[in-house]
Image: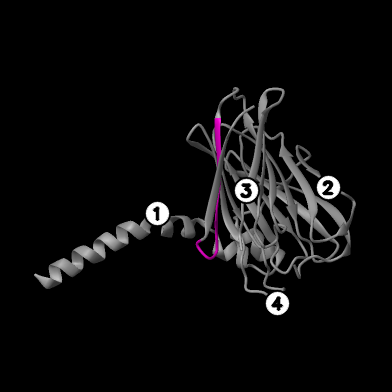
Amino acid sequence: MSGPMKMRATLAAGYTDVRVLMTHPMTTAQSNQPLHFIQSVTVKQNGRTVVEAQISQAVSRNPVFTFRLKGGAKGDKIEVSWLDNKGESNKIEASVA
Amino acid sequence: MNTLRRTLIGAAAVLLLRPFAALAAAWNKDAFGAKTLADALKGIGATDAAASKDLLIEAPQIAENGAVVPVEISSNIPGTTSIAVVIEKNPFPLAAQFDFLDGALPYVKVNIKMGETSDVRAVATAGGRRYAAAKEIKVTIGGCGG
């Protein structure tokens, strides 16, 4: 059901811009499908957790997030992972370009 | 002997499952399960939030498709550690809560689903206090069935 992720991390003026896409159905209690949605999202910068998010079924299908991290440098390792209500998870890692 | 072994196996299983349970427990079931704005705000401890002009919500005034409404929230309130997104008229108003640890700016852009025209509220936490801002987004086709 859930598929690959995509991420792009780039340096901007004074911050690192992190855009991440997750492939996930994000079905709601109002749809006729089983409730299936991502519940937590974690962003790490060089192994250190910088953003911890809890989300609900109200986030759109195939969620796209943009985060901004203070400072940063080329080559920083950014990792984004998610966990859903069925215990499925996925993560992606990229270097800041 | 057998009991001891079982106890040990049990203990090992508990230890193995713990990281998972810890993650699951972190999800604020009460707040996300709340069906009214008041209960959702109560769930995240934000009943006494003060209106702030330093909490910015960028979003379309009219969203043609309620299934994908881009919302950009940033806080200029010093020391902001968390931003929650609450959609007043959704069946479950609390959509997301973002905790920003040292190293992250209090900024997020996310696509949300809206069942109907509603106020979208941002609730920020800074220095133990709560701040709120709201913006109405008109929805022509609701997007909660997806």
Asked whether B78 or B28 is in front, the reply is B28
Q: Secondary structure at mark 1?
A: helix
Q: Amino acid at mark 2?
A: Ala
Whether discs 1 and 3 lie on one chain: the answer is no
Number of residues whose C-alpha sits closer than 10 Å to that of mark 3, classed few (under 14), some (14–19) or many (20 or more): some
Q: Chain of mark 1?
A: B
Left or right, B114 with reference to B16 = right
* x 67%, y 67%: residue: A27
Residue A6 locus on image (x, y percent)? 65, 44
Say which label, 1 or 2, has the lower sequence index.
Answer: 1
Find the distance from the CA under tag 4 to the CA under tag 1.
32 Å
* B53 inside magenta stretch: no
Task: Determine whether label 2 and label 3 are within 8 Å by CB.
Answer: no
Q: Which residue bears the numbered disc 2?
A: B59
Residue B52 locus on image (x, y percent)? 75, 42
- Main SS of the magenta segment? strand
